Image: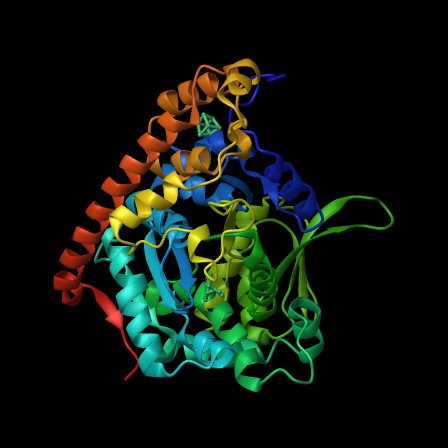
């Protein structure tokens, strides 16, 4: 029954992977071996997909600069789903990333109709305190979108490269959609590209850890990154000889920029009105580097398309979806620890109806929300978790003992987290936080 080949496999992952093939998302396993001490979410396939994570892994190994960026709409209570994203931000920061966290008050204002005051309250009280309590370091930047001039300016510039048809194709925007809602989408793209601005020392790989529902934003932003750039490097093929070569397009570049570029590229090159054919230098990465340098010298953009990771969602504690509108389905990081433990005890398991049956047939950890809690959040030791899994499927473990263990761990986590939140409150002014003025 249980092939034991892959202890972390889950049916959702296969569904997601199918869903994403068409959007060019790669399975995370492909990069896993390149990552020095991967995070628990990576080892356990909670993170199942990525785009361009190779460059992030390489930066971690070589010590080259890279960033992690994420945004939170200040919409309500901070819960375990947000914790997943925050854990990943903190981990990348520990691995050497400069970290950027945007509080998407423009989105909450335009989509939810929240006042700036309410955005600020929820932003600090829910998200920022928990982010810091989970280990975010003061070197990182936290900002409210509406207080961040560079993000707002960039959002406006990006807006020139996207039209209504594209937005309605990606987000289903219609004639009813407000201008502010559209602007909030451009602002989110600006959030993601901001770490590569000159004031943050220029182009670098940036990873945005998200759930699959946020992928449309990334597709839009990656497209915009290309459209903003002064040059574009392409692989071409000579129609007559079939020989492959590289070519740099520079539609918006000044003549001088193209000429300067021509001088810097090794080997034979041919300069045209708006592009340069590179005939003897097949090194794509090398060429991209040269092109970036020249673009920056001529005050153009040279964004690297943002990388991303995709994590699967936990299911609701009662089965079904985990949702903020059903408090019983999820655990808020500010829930009373006793209440949190109770929710665990009431959660749906993958056990059988009777104990006899369970001893005979075993349980189903892949359909068990208590097991999921341990897998995502509560047990850091892979060996212990695999033992529990094995005992469960072989029918030697009963749900009561899992619930007891998970409830205790949840109580402990919430109590500790809430103490850390209070400490964070006192440390707030040691952090770089840009508020709306
Ligand atoms: N749209 C995201 C949400 O609904 C918030 C967000 C804003 C974001 N800017 C971002 C997410 C940048 C990732 C990257 O929560
Ligand atoms: Fe879930 Fe544990 Fe019951 Fe298995 S024994 S179904 S892991 S609660």
Identify which residue is drawn at 51% across, 57% down. Answer: 304
Q: Is residue 263 above or below residue 124?
A: above
In x, y percent, where is residue 419? 16, 52
Identify which residue is drawn at 36% across, 22% down. Answer: 384
Could you tell whether 8 is left or right of 173 in the image?
left
Identify which residue is drawn at 65% across, 73% down. Answer: 167
Total labels drawn: 0
Residue 278 seen by the camera: no
Q: In the rendered image, which quarter contains the N terminus?
A: top right
Q: In the rendered image, which quarter contains the C terminus?
A: bottom left
Colour setting: rainbow
Q: Name the residue nearer the viewer: 99 or 169.
A: 169
Identify which residue is drawn at 54% across, 70% down. Answer: 257
In x, y percent, where is residue 337? 25, 48
Could you tell whether 143 is left or right of 42 in the image?
left
Q: Name the residue nearer the viewer: 253 or 124.
A: 124
Q: Is residue 115 above or below residue 186?
A: below
In x, y percent, where is residue 182? 57, 79
Q: Quadrant of residue 198?
A: bottom left
Q: Quadrant of residue 166?
A: bottom right
Residue 243 seen by the camera: yes
Could you tell whether 276 is left or right of 137 in the image?
right
**Furthest residue to the right?**
240
Q: Name the residue nearer the viewer: 415 or 273.
A: 415
Q: Is residue 7 above or below residue 268?
A: above
Q: Is residue 366 above or below residue 344?
A: above
In x, y percent, where is residue 400? 38, 28
Q: Name the residue nearer the viewer: 363 or 423.
A: 363
């Amino acid at each position: 029954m249980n092939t034991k080949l892959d202890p972390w496999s889950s049916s959702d992952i296969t569904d997601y992977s199918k869903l994403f093939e068409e959007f060019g998302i790669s399975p995370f396993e492909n990069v896993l071996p390149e990552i020095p001490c991967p995070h628990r979410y990576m080892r356990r396939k909670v993170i199942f997909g990525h785009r361009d994570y190779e460059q992030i892994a390489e930066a971690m190994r070589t010590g080259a600069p890279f960033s992690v960026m994420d945004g939170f709409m200040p919409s309500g209570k901070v819960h375990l789903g947000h914790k997943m994203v925050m854990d990943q931000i903190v981990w990348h920061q520990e691995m050497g990333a400069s970290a950027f966290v945007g509080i998407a008050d423009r989105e909450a204002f335009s989509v939810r109709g929240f006042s700036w005051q309410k955005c600020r309250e929820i932003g600090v009280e829910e998200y920022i305190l928990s982010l810091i309590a989970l280990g975010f370091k003061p070197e990182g930047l936290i900002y409210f979108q509406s207080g961040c001039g560079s993000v707002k300016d960039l959002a406006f510039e990006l807006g020139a490269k996207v039209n209504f048809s594209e937005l309605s194709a990606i987000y289903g925007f219609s004639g009813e959609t407000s201008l502010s809602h559209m602007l909030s989408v451009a602002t989110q793209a600006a959030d993601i590209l901001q770490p590569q601005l000159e004031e943050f020392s220029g182009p670098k790989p940036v990873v945005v850890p998200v759930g699959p529902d946020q992928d449309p934003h990334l597709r839009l932003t990656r497209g915009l990154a290309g459209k903003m750039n002064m040059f574009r490097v392409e692989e071409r093929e000579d129609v007559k000889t079939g020989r492959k070569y590289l070519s740099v397009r520079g539609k918006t570049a000044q003549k001088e920029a193209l000429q300067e570029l021509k001088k810097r590229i090794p080997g034979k090159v041919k300069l045209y009105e708006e592009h340069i054919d590179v005939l003897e230098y097949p090194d794509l990465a090398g060429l991209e580097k040269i092109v970036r340098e020249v673009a920056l010298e001529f005050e153009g953009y040279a964004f690297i398309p943002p990388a991303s990771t995709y994590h699967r969602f936990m299911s609701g504690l009662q089965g079904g979806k985990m949702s903020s509108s059903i408090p019983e389905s999820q655990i808020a990081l500010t829930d009373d620890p006793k209440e949190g433990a109770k929710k665990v005890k009431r959660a749906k398991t993958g056990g059988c109806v009777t104990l006899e049956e369970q001893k005979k047939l075993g349980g189903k950890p892949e359909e068990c929300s208590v097991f999921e809690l341990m897998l995502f959040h509560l047990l850091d030791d892979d060996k212990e978790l695999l033992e529990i899994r094995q005992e469960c499927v072989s029918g030697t473990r009963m749900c009561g003992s899992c619930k007891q263990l998970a409830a205790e761990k949840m109580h402990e986590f919430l109590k500790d987290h809430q103490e850390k939140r209070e400490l964070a409150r006192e440390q707030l002014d040691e952090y770089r936080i840009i508020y709306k003025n």
